[in-house]
């Protein structure tokens, strides 16, 4: 891990707790969700090799000792990838990312070091510079490229934004993450904790269930179909035996997508359901009975109600 030299903040009074929000922003596929999951040690944000998987802000809560001998509650905010939007859904996703950054005490610009800079990354950096808010540069996937390529990349981005610090990490294997967390534990403001110490997220179980189903759609369907689907939990019922019954509807934009998603004799949707149920059983730590329904709904990605159902605010 490499850190640029900056003056050290004053050490707080002994025993003073710290708490604050650190928003993770960047272009699609920079590894933001992987980083959140790795830092928190829990599956909070869904991950797939496809870009634009995350659609709304996801909060991860973790505790970290600080130098005062007390604890810092680090509130990590995973945001959607920032890209040029076309649909109402896209615009709401990008707005959610920038809202997450503007509401945070500190912004982490996560950059795929292997891919390097492009117009999208430079545009995000330029907007961060305009906002004049506290920002750190975090270069991800640094284990995949020669070290000599990192310094020019760091220099180029620091020409755009006056980053307080630069960190070299790998969200996939954990390189540099302890140093990043230690720095966050000192950088966030002195404050009481905002959440119970044993909480991992504020994501409702209903929304988590819908996201796990949507993740399996991204992983199992290799065409463009996942981008035209959304999932809503219609029923989340606690049973007397401790299990939970979850009924979810998958909305697709086209009739042809519905047929592909269901598969021959229902084979594809059964596989998606089985894999999602296994994940949910582990995450919720109880038996899960999952029932999926697929409906065609043209134009769902332009409907305010559908966007609100998946956790997005729409101000258009």
Image (spheres, rainbow, N blue to C red):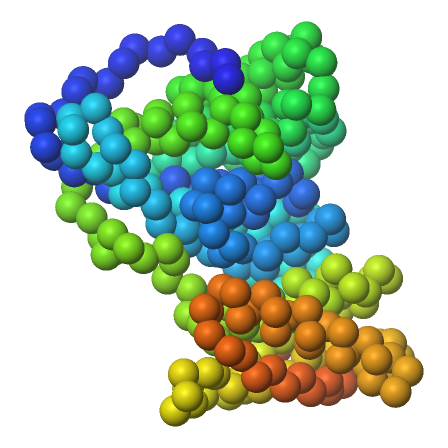
Q: Nearer the viewer, residue 128 or 226?
A: 226
**Residue 305 at least partly seen:** no
Instruction: Give the quadrant of residue 23.
Output: top left
Identified at 41% across, 83% down, the residue is: 242
Q: Position of residue 80 (x, y in %)?
A: 57, 51
Q: What count of labels does the image hold? A: 0
Identified at 34% across, 27% down, the residue is: 182
Q: Nearer the viewer, residue 274 or 12?
A: 274
Q: Nearer the viewer, residue 287 or 180?
A: 287
Is 118 rendered above or below residue 59?
above
**Residue 282 at least partly seen:** yes
Side of 147 where 108 appears, left or right:
left
Q: Nearer the viewer, residue 66 or 232?
A: 66
Q: Position of residue 138 (x, y in %)?
A: 52, 27
Q: Position of residue 149 (x, y in %)?
A: 69, 12
Q: Position of residue 31 (x, y in %)?
A: 61, 40
Is 255 rendered above or below residue 137?
below
Identified at 41% across, 51% down, the residue is: 60
Side of 180 where 46 appears, left or right:
right
Is 108 rendered above or below residue 159?
below
Identified at 39% across, 91% down, the residue is: 240
- Tell which residue pokes out farthest to the bottom in this image: 240
Side of 210 where 14 appears, left or right:
left
Is 283 rendered above or below residue 192?
below
């Amino acid at each position: 891990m490499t850190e640029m030299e900056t003056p050290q903040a004053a050490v707080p009074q002994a025993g003073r707790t710290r708490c604050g929000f650190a928003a993770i922003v960047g272009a699609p596929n920079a590894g933001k969700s992987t980083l959140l999951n790795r830092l928190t040690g829990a599956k909070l944000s869904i991950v797939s090799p496809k870009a634009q998987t995350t659609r709304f802000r996801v909060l991860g809560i973790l505790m970290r000792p600080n130098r005062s001998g007390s604890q810092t509650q680090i509130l990590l905010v995973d945001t959607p990838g920032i890209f040029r939007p076309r649909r109402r859904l896209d615009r709401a996703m990008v707005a959610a990312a920038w809202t997450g950054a503007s509401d945070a005490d500190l912004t982490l610009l996560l950059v795929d070091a292997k891919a390097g800079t492009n117009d999208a990354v430079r545009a995000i950096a330029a907007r961060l510079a305009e906002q004049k808010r506290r920002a750190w540069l975090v270069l991800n996937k640094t284990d995949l490229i020669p070290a000599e390529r990192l310094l020019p990349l760091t220099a180029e981005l620091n020409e755009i934004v006056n980053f307080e610090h630069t960190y070299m990490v790998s969200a996939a294997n954990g390189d540099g993450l302890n140093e990043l967390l230690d720095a966050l534990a000192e950088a966030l403001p002195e404050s009481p904790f905002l959440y119970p110490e044993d909480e991992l997220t504020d994501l409702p179980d209903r929304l988590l269930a819908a996201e796990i189903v949507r993740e399996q759609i991204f992983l199992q369907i290799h065409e463009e179909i996942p981008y035209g689907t959304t999932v809503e939990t219609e029923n989340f019922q606690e049973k007397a035996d401790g299990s939970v019954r979850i009924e979810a509807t998958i909305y697709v934009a086209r009739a042809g997508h519905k047929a592909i998603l269901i598969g021959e004799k229902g084979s594809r949707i059964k596989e998606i359901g089985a894999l999602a149920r296994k994940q949910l059983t582990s995450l919720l730590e109880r038996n899960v009975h999952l029932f999926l329904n697929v409906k065609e709904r043209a134009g769902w990605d332009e409907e305010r109600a559908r966007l609100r159902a998946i956790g997005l605010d729409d101000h258009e």
